[in-house]
Image: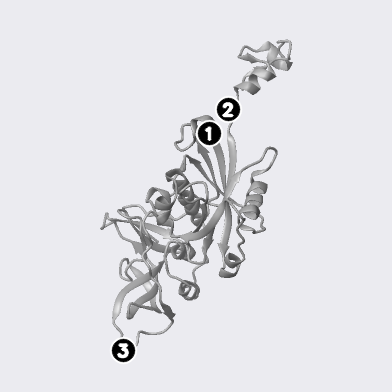
C-alpha cells in the first residue's frame, strides 16, 4: 500500500520518515480499481438439476440474481433479486463462489464501458416440488424457469455463466467452502474440477429400490459395490474422458465383510448393489478412470438416481453401521494415488 500524505502533500504519521510512493487520499482513491458487483443464487431440485431463468432481453439462460445496488450487501441483493424475480422470500447466508470477471469479457456493449465485476454465487438449496410450485414470476423480464441437467448449462447459458454455475455446483458438492474463481475458473481446482465432473450428462439410474435378493428369473443388468474406506467414505470411479461418475464393480478391490444391499429395478432387470469394507486399493490398472474417495451423499449428488436414491442411501448407511465405520463428514473427494493404498 502506498504511503499517504495530507491534502497539502505533507507525509502523515510515521510514514514521514520512510521512503516510498507518496499519494494524497484523492490520488489513492482514484488509483483503485472500480468494479461492478453482482449476486446470483444457485438452486437445485431434488434430482440435482439447476434452476435457470428465461428472460425477455437476451437469448441465453441465467441463474436468478442481478446487480448489487449502491450501499447494498451482496447477500441482501441476492434475497431481493429472488423476491423480485421469482416471488420467493428467503435468506442466503452460504456462499458457493466469488468470481472475478475481467473488463474484456465479450457480450457487453462498448458504450456500457464494462469495468469488470465481482460476482457472488449464493447457495439457494434444494427446492421441493411444493416450493417450485410457489414461484410467482413478475409481469416482465422473467418469462419462465426450468431445471436443467448440469451438463446442459454449457448449451443453455453464456460460456462464462455456465463455467461459473458448474464451478459453484462442484464447490457445493465438495463442501470445502466458497470457491475463488477467475472468469468462472477455480483458482485452486478440486478433484471434481480437474476431472471435469458433470460436464457430460449423468447416466440415468432410475428405478424402484428393492432391499431384497433378486427374484429368480429377473435378469441382472450390472453389479456395483459400495466399497468403504476406514473413514466411512466410498470408492468412486470417474471416467477421465467424460467426467462421468460410477460406482465400481463389487470385486474391483480387496474387501472384507461383503453383504448384499438390494437392487434397483430398471430396464426390465436388476442393477445389483453390495456393500463391503476395503482392505486395500491396488495399484492403478486402468488409466481411463480416476479413483476417488467420496461420501455416499456426494456419490448420490453426482448421479441421476431419482427419488429411489434416498432409499438406497439409507441402506448404504445401515450397511456402514453394520461394518462399524464412522459417518464421514463432507470434505472434498480425494483422488487416490496411482500406487494405491493399504489400511
**Viewer-proximal residue among 111 and 315:** 111
SS at badge 2: loop
Report the Cα–Cα distance between label 3 and label 2. Answer: 70 Å
Q: Position of residue 171 (x, y in %)?
A: 50, 51
How busy is the neighbourhood of tag 3: few (under 14 within 10 Å), some, or many (20 plus)? few
- Mark 2 — residue? 33
Crowd around label 2: few <14 · some 14–19 · many ≥20 (10 Å): few
Report the residue marked by disc 1: 116
Secondary structure of the residue carrying numbered label 1: loop
The residue that label 3 is drawn on is 216
Q: Is residue 231 visible?
A: no
Quarter of the image holding residue 222? bottom left
At 42% from the left and 45% from the top, the residue drawn is 159
Extreme-front residue of the structure: 139
Q: Earlier in the sequence, mark 3 or mark 1?
A: 1
Is residue 214 rendered to the left or right of residue 7?
Answer: left
Amino acid at each position: 500500500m502506498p504511503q499517504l500524505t495530507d491534502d497539502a502533500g505533507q507525509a502523515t504519521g510515521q510514514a514521514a520518515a520512510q521512503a516510498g510512493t507518496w499519494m494524497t487520499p484523492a490520488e489513492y482513491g482514484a488509483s483503485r480499481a472500480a468494479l461492478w458487483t453482482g449476486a446470483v443464487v444457485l438452486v437445485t431440485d431434488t434430482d440435482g438439476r439447476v434452476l435457470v431463468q428465461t428472460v425477455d432481453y437476451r437469448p441465453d439462460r441465467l441463474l436468478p440474481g442481478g446487480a448489487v445496488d449502491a450501499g447494498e450487501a451482496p447477500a441482501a441483493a441476492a434475497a431481493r433479486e429472488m423476491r423480485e424475480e421469482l416471488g420467493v422470500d428467503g435468506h442466503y447466508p452460504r456462499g458457493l463462489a466469488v468470481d472475478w470477471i475481467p473488463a474484456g469479457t465479450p457480450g457487453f456493449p462498448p458504450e456500457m464501458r464494462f469495468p469488470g465485476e465481482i460476482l457472488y454465487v449464493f447457495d439457494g438449496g434444494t427446492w421441493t416440488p411444493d416450493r417450485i410450485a410457489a414461484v410467482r414470476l413478475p409481469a416482465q423480464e422473467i418469462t419462465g424457469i426450468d431445471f436443467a441437467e448440469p451438463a446442459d448449462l454449457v448449451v443453455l447459458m453464456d460460456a462464462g455463466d455456465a463455467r461459473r454455475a458448474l464451478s459453484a455446483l462442484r464447490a457445493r458438492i465438495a463442501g470445502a467452502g466458497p470457491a475463488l474463481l477467475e472468469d468462472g475458473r477455480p483458482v485452486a481446482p478440486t478433484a471434481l474440477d480437474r476431472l471435469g465432473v458433470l460436464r457430460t450428462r449423468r447416466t440415468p439410474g432410475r428405478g424402484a429400490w428393492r432391499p431384497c435378493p433378486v427374484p429368480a428369473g429377473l435378469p441382472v443388468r450390472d453389479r456395483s459395490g459400495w466399497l468403504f474406506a476406514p473413514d466411512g467414505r466410498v470408492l468412486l470411479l470417474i471416467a477421465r474422458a467424460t467426467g462421468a461418475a460410477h460406482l465400481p464393480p463389487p470385486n474391483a478391490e480387496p474387501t472384507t465383510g461383503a453383504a448384499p444391499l438390494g437392487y434397483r429395478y430398471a430396464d426390465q432387470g436388476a442393477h445389483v448393489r453390495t456393500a463391503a469394507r476395503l482392505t486395500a486399493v491396488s495399484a492403478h490398472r486402468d488409466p481411463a478412470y480416476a479413483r476417488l474417495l467420496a461420501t455416499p451423499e456426494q456419490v448420490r449428488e453426482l448421479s441421476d438416481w431419482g427419488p429411489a436414491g434416498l432409499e438406497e442411501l439409507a441402506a448404504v448407511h445401515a450397511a456402514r453401521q453394520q461394518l462399524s465405520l464412522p459417518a464421514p463428514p463432507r470434505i472434498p473427494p480425494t483422488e487416490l494415488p496411482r500406487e494405491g493404498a493399504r489400511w
